[in-house]
Every structure is written in C-alpha cells, then in structure tokens.
Image (tube, helix red, strand yellow):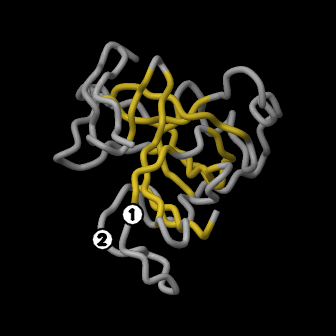
Amino acid sequence: MQPSKRLCHIGSMDTPAIDGWFTVDDDTVHLIGTRCAECRTVCFPPRTGFCPNPRCPGEELVPARLSRRGTVWSYTDARYPPPAPFVAAEPYTPVTLAAVELAEEGIVVLGQVKDLTVDDLHVGMELELTAGPLADGPLVWMWGRPRGPGQTGAGAPASTGGTGGTGGTGGTGGTGGTT
C-alpha cells in the first residue's frame, strides 16, 4: 500500500515533516510501518532491506498501516528548547511527549502529545493518533485523547507518580515481535 499524497488541513499545515512515515486520509491519521512478508515482524519507522528479526531470513518488507490507538508506556515533558537545527517557537512553550505501545503491534512509538500535559497522563492510559504542526510549520503525528468508541483510558484520573522517563525505545519507534 502506498501512503496517500492527499493531506488534510490539520492545524492549517499540510506538509508532512517526514514523508512516508504517516499519512492523513479524510482527517484520519495513520502511521506507516513495514511488515516482514515471512514472519510478520512489524517495524516503525518504515525500512527496507532485511527483516530485523534475527531468527527470520526474510528480505521482503511491505508497507503497512499501523494501529491508531495504544496505551501510554512512558511520558515526559520537554521544558527546554532543543538545539538547532530544530526550530522552536518564540517564546518556547514546553511540549508533552509520550511513548505509546500500539494496540495491535505491541511496538512503542514516541510522539508529541496534543492538548494534554503530564498532569493529564498516566501509564496505561489509552491515546489515539492525531496530527498537528511543529513550531516551524510541518505536520507531524501526535497522540491525543481517543475519539468515539473504545475510549477506555482517556477519562481516568492521572496517576500521582508517572514515569517521567522516555522509555527504552531509543527514539521514534522500534521493532515488534510477530503479530
């Protein structure tokens, strides 16, 4: 499946920050990963080449839309502006980040959180994929409160502890086991 080139206007931006990692179709955001044709291992961000599963000899990774919902695995806030070349808003406004374990694939994907703070989040809370612009304009995927059916964790009170860390994913995603 090819990612759609048609993007909607979410937050008045329509240029993706990273082409091919997500798509927006009819106001619905989808992460685009890859799945091994042989063992079904899922990867995000999408990749080419050999299957990352060391027990699999597979060499065909096919594009796949990933789950739109998942649960908070870890979260934090970024209180200091990142260094160049990132363009931060002036004045800098702290952003909330969450590592979310995708419901079906079981992999953890890091993203900015929209319209929620660390005080609103707790480990295990359900979030849904959405999108919004970065300070310099490009559109990115974000996590937000679930819309509609399946809203199991968004209304629960925030925990007093929280993990505050970024988890063990080492970046924007990871690879998962077979699904």
Place of residue 47 in the rendered image (x, y in percent of width and height, measured from the top left): 33, 61
Give the answer, above or below, for where 63 lies relative to 43.
Answer: above
**Res. 73 image quadrant:** bottom right
With respect to residue 61, does 21 lie above or below?
above
Give 87 or 132, whichever is nearer the viewer. Answer: 132
- Which SS class for mark 2? loop
User: What is the spatial separation of the Cα atoms under label 2 and label 1, in whole angstroms?
Assistant: 7 Å
**Residue 33 picture location, percent across and down:** 43, 52
Residue at 59% over, 30% down: 144
Left or right side of 83 for 112: right
Viewer-nearest residue: 63 or 11: 63
N-term-proximal mark, 2 vs 1: 2
The amino acid sitting under disc 1 is Leu
Q: Which numbered tag is attached to residue 61? A: 1
Q: Is residue 90 left or right of residue 124?
A: left
Q: Residue at x 55, y 36 (%)?
A: 143
Q: Residue furthest bottom?
A: 55
Are the two marked residues, 2 and 1, in contact with CB atoms closer than 8 angstroms?
yes
Mark 2 nearby-residue class (10 Å; few <14, some 14–19, many ≥20): few
Residue 31, x across and y down, in percent: 46, 42
- The structure residue drawn at horizontal position 43% and vertical position 23%, both measured from the top left corner, is 25
Label 2 is placed on what type of residue? Gly
The residue located at (42%, 74%) in the rendering is 51
Tell me where residue 84 appears, x and y as whole percent: 18, 47
Q: Which residue is mark 2?
A: 49
Quarter of image, res 45: bottom left
Using the image, tell me which numbered label, if any, was put on residue 119. Answer: none
Horizontally, is 3 left or right of 28 in the view?
left
